[in-house]
Image (tube, helix red, strand yellow):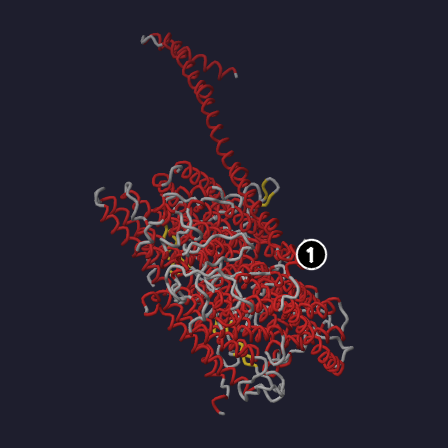
Amino acid sequence: MDFLHFSPETDFKLLLAVPLIPLIGYVVQVFFGRFLPRKGDWLLTGGMGVSMAIAVLMLAKVLHEGGGEHGGGGFFQLSSDAGLSWAWLYQSGKAAVSPLNLEVGILYDGLGAAMLAVVGVVSFFVHLFSIGYMKGDRRYHLFFANISLFSVAMIGLVLADSLLVLFIFWEIMGLMSYLLIGHFSHDQSTPFFQRWATWASKKAFLTTRVGDCCLLIGMMMFWQHYHTFEFVDLWRLANEDVARNGGEWPMWMTIAGLFIFGGTVGKSAQFPLHIWLPDAMAGPTPVSAMIHAATMVAAGVFLLGRTFPILSPEVLAVVTATGAFTALFAATIGVTAFDLKAVLAWSTISQLGFMVAAIGTGGIGLVAGLFHMVTHAFFKSCLFLSAGSVIHGCHHEQDMRKMGGLRTRMPLTFAAMGISTLAIAGIPLFSGFYSKDKIIQAAFTKTSLEFSGAAVFAAVALPIAAALTAFYMFRMMFMTFGGTYRGEVAEAHGHGHGHDEHDDHHDHELVHSEDGGIAPGHPGPLPVESSWPMTVSLLCLAALGFLGGKFWLADFDVLAHHAPWFVRLVSPETLYPGVELMNGYGHAITHEMVEHAEHTAHTLALVVSLLVAGLGIFGAWWFYGARKASPERVAAALGEVYRTVARKYYVDEFVNATVIRLTHLLAHVQRWFDENVVDGIVVGVGRANRSLGFLQAWFDRTVVDGLVNGTAAVTQLFGSLARLFQTGRIQQYVTFAVGGGLIAAAWLILA
Amino acid sequence: MDSTLLTWITFIPLIGTAVIMCLPQRALGAVKVVSLVATFIPLVLATVAYVGFDKTTEQMQLVANVPWISGLGVNYHVGVDGLSLPLVWLTTLLLFIGVPASFGIEKAGRAYYALLLLLEVGIVGVFVSLDYFLFYVYWEIMLLPMYFLIGIWGGPRREYAAIKFFLYTLAGSVLMLVALVALRLSSGTFSILEMVDMAQAGALTGANLPFGGVLLGMKFTTWVFWFLFVAFAIKVPVFPFHTWLPDAHVQAPTPISVILAGILLKLGGYGMLRACFPIVPDAFRTFAYALGVLGVISIIYGAFVALGQTDFKRMVAYSSVSHMGYVLLGFAALTEWGMSGAALQMFNHGTSSAALFLVVGVIYDRAHHRDLNGFGGLSQPMPVYWGLTTVAFFAALGLPGMAGFVSEALTLVGAYDSADPRFRILVLLSVIGIVITAGFLLWAMQRVFLGSLNEKYKDLPDINLREILCQAPLLFLCVALGIFPHFLLDWMEPSVRHLVGLLGGAG
């Protein structure tokens, strides 16, 4: 298959088209979108479709080139090797070739290929879904423009060959998430969302920016030592350094690594910077799907994949512990949520915890964590879009207690969401099973080889979190699709069954509800299935969520005789070619021991993950499907514990009471200081000078002027005296002159 | 290129002033046209100079050097290098924007435009002077129109603000004058370049003066350094010399704020680079860390005080204090990236803060107040205005892809890379400023544009074409220079490298 051959010169240019097409689309849309027919949605959706096609074609090429039968050769390409890179800071003179210049290029490897395809696919279907979902929105054209640029940012981040370029797109993505989460903050017709979106978007930007600043610091620390931002050089130089050091990681590298991980904590919503993500659902549901699946949160995990070789074992232990804690922490909150989207938001945080924890264990865990990022992107985007479809059908109701019985009313949505739920719960044959099973296996492997607190914690916490995941996901399914419809039915406004008409929602005065902050819906006719752009997107993503775990584009290996496709693309060896990783196990642990441990852990992990998934599903069925026990009574029995969990452990309240309040206090204190002390001194000096001026004026009037006047008086006196002599008579003058002359002569002679 | 080019750029506005003074008071339309022409020609000429600039050398270019006051040894000596030329170009651009931005001003229009053009003469003059006496003359020329422009056309407390501005800057001028006389006595020349050469040769120590180079226990160079530094620091403004700035900004009319923030503040930074640090490099090295500390205090303190403001314009003014702190930090770090970043930051702050003041001006013209808490939901009546403001805000908070990011990142990375490891702590601290900056800008965005619409303002007209055209070039530069920073950095690089060498820093 000749067309599947990767030729760097042409293919890197083709890769460049992937971000450029939506970028051009964005510019056109911002300026001319509102004049285009259908407000330009076809333009950007089509553009994204082309980008997706290129990305998938490229993935096929990469699989053809690198992904041999059983994990094979790997694939790694740098555009700068092919002579395709762009001098950014300087383009002429001595500096253009000096190490101070920054060369911008593309790094395209197995991980990048997979992620690029995932971003393309998810983004395209989100675009398509939005055509149906956002219909009637008053900033429709801008929504499409922004969501396109959001994708561009993620694509750029995936293709970046240096930490700085990655950071640039990382931040642009932050901006786009700000604008998209805040989409409804311009919409007067939904006051609840308007208020919520306004502060949620700000919260998201500021919280992630704390993480971004950590990343920036980490970057600076590495720059100061190696004077490069390029991944390839950083990997090599850092590991050579450590090797020279006898395998000991220098202190600064650990600190820098922790700062870089801070970036992931912010973007990938790890504890304690997770607070922005649940509120990010204030944005339109397609945006949530983007944020939770292919962009934003995936960026943090992707960063870990790109910087893994420069993270010291100590950093990796922190990464594992943070991830495992977040996974468990968020899962418990997910159990208590009643807002359909909040359940999904907490589940995202929990799943991100899985990924981060897995990457922290290194080796097979690195692959598993990145793999989970990919499979999660498919099923989570599908889950969110399904939730959007449900909410759309239920007249903007998000409270699961007011849903139910939608299985028959929205069968396609039910099918899509059901498949994705099976995937996230970790049921065999569904994609999530493969990745989650591998994560648990990685945790077990790590524990058996290297008994450390972080590894043990991960090995215990992750299975519990997996059980909780299965529980709350099926709880959601039972509450939403099972039983009978509990929403208020009203044949309101005489608009018939036209659910594509969004207008009525906007006419409706939504009341701010303090009831757990769940966006309120309004009574309407019984829900019906959504329009075709939405359902097609749902089903395609659901299909990927089902198959994504194993199928391999080139040979449709649906039964997965071989390793999952991703595992063939990505392994620590192919991801960081030529780099001797120094953050793995010590010399005491041989390759055979690792293989043996992985083998043992594999069986155990399989049993455990099946067990916990089954347990979670059974629990959900017990409480919510068959209703053999009342969840309300359990909640009441738990009392304060339940309330704490339901209030998200009061993290938001804590942050508000400390960080936010302290910041504002500092601002006010410094403002006071500025106006009263700093400026006070200036004004004081001015006043003092003026007073001095007055004093001098007085002095001038009385003393100086007095002196002058006095002088005048004295002069006058002398004048009057002189007048005595100035008689005008010649003889007298002569007498004075002669007399004076005589006296002078006498004085001269005698002296 | 013609060596009279800089002279033309400097004095064409003066011709404009003369023409305006000859026009009758009533002919405001003609006055505006003359002002536009008299600011447009320098912009074109400056662009010509920029395009024709030789990017391979750190030598002064377009030099003209003729005796002026031969008895004192004062020459009319002008020329540009990679540090001054971008700022000259920025000056001509902002003045050209300043004219249409002033079209709303009714009061005594003729005098206003005449003073505006006179201001341009002073500013460009400072940037091109290579003779210290000439430099000082232009420095003082610039002060006067500014005083009147704030004091006559300003807000309710204009007299207070104008006098504060005038006296504060004059105090700085006096310090500069003292240092200038001392330098003249010690070096025997007014030429800045010769002084720099002497300083390099170690000949500018004041040893030939009656007190033998040490005065009150402090070295002559130390005295000169602090006198000049404070003179320029007032202009930048560096904490704690900044309090004239918010008052001047709040009272000044919009175009004057634009010029004040866009260029006048740069005079301080430029003055340090041209006429302070290289003349007394040893003293600079001694106190570099202290300067860095002042820079970081400005960054953090400015950001926090901006967060505490309720007046839109005061907030933007304090954001300038914060942003100019990077300039000082970059200088002090004495690395090539730090210095490039700082020089770039001066230019980029010139565009982004000018854009921010235009933003404030638009809303002030319509609502006649600037209370951040008195708006709300303005993105609905004014969507285009909101869009432009978003670009300006994100340019100001240093979003990657925008110009501010390049300069701030270069400054911070360069400072972190400084030979003096203590700078690393400063950089870590200044990161707080980045977060707070994002905080106050987004909070302002929320209070003014988002949330529920203030009923009073639901019929506000959107930004008009004239205002868009004033804003557009600035925002274009903010974005374009973020993607293609080499359009400035290539020009600056030889001069920056030379300067870092002069100051004794590593590359």
Q: Examine the rendering and report whether any part of residue B112 can be seen.
A: yes
Q: Examine the rendering and report whether any part of residue B493 can be seen.
A: no
Q: Is residue B74 above or below residue B60?
A: above
Front residue (pair A204, A685): A204
Coordinates of residue A510 in the picture (x, y in percent): 45, 54
**Label 1 marks which chain's residue?**
A
- The kind of residue on which mark 1 rests is Ala
Q: Is residue B38 above or below residue A307?
A: above
Extreme residue toward the bottom, this view: A1
Dot 1 surroundings within 10 Å: few (below 14), some, or many (20 or more)?
Answer: few
Residue A320: image quadrant is bottom right
Coordinates of residue A343 in the picture (x, y in percent): 58, 64
Residue A270: image quadrant is bottom right
Q: Is residue A553 above or below residue B42?
A: below
Query: For this view, does B175 lie left or right of residue A651?
Result: left
Residue under the point 71% across and 75% down: A608
Marker count (numbered):
1
Extreme residue toward the right, this view: A588
Coordinates of residue A275 in the picture (x, y in percent): 58, 58
Q: Which residue is mark 1?
A: A637
Query: For this view, does A559 lie left or right of residue B238?
Result: right
Q: Quick one: SS at disc 1?
A: helix
Front residue (pair B57, A548): A548
Front residue (pair A208, A728): A208
Coordinates of residue B292 in the picture (x, y in percent): 57, 52
Front residue (pair B117, A434): A434
